[in-house]
Amino acid sequence: MPQVSIICGSSSDEEIAKKTWEILNKYEISYDYQVISAHRNPDRLDEYITESNAKVFICIAGLAAALPGVVASKTKKPVIGVPVSGKLMGGLDALLSIVQMPKGVPVACVGVDNGENAAHLAARILGII
């Protein structure tokens, strides 16, 4: 059973996911990695969240960055959002999308492209460090 689920909204976000799983590996934290778009594969995402035994979700997304909020709306488990830099706004659009969640749907947010800090935060949530 993975302790952490890493979900990318697009395969183009994999470089940031690699940074994340490198830190999780250092802490010997088990994880599962998926590429599931909140926009293109909503049913698959819903099924994955429902069936996952992970204790923490790390969601990596750019542009509208809906993925972390959608995941947080479907689980009571902690969700960490990692905004991805973009060509037009350098990730500011994704950052603002992730931090502006409505009351009752919290998402922790780390810096743009900072998958490492997402892994460190997950380790703290799990009580590893």
Image (cartoon, rainbow, N blue to C red):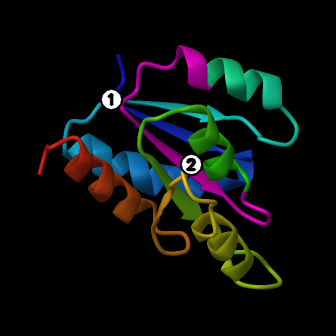
Drawn side of residue 7 relative to residue 42, left or right: left
Residue at horizontal 50%, vertical 20%? 52
Q: Residue furthest right?
A: 40
Mark 1 vs 2, N-terminal side: 1
Q: Position of residue 51 (x, y in %)?
A: 55, 14
Name the residue type under label 2: Cys
* Tally of numbered tags: 2
* Residue 32 counted in the magenta span: no
Name the residue type under label 1: Gln
As rendered, which of 115 and 71 lies closer to the eye?
Answer: 71
* Residue 53 counted in the magenta span: yes
> Taking 29 as reference, is 107 above or below it?
below
Q: Position of residue 94 (x, y in %)?
A: 69, 70
**Span of residues in magenta:** 49-65
**According to the image, label 2 marks what residue?**
59
Element assignment for label 2: strand
Q: Position of residue 48 (x, y in %)?
A: 62, 21
Drawn side of residue 115 relative to residue 51, left or right: left
Residue at horizontal 64%, vertical 51%? 69
Mark linked to residue 38: none
**According to the image, label 1 marks what residue?**
3
Q: Residue furthest front?
A: 103
Q: Position of residue 9 (x, y in %)?
A: 71, 46
Image quarter hosting the N terminus? top left
Q: Distance from label 1 to label 2 (Cα)?
A: 14 Å
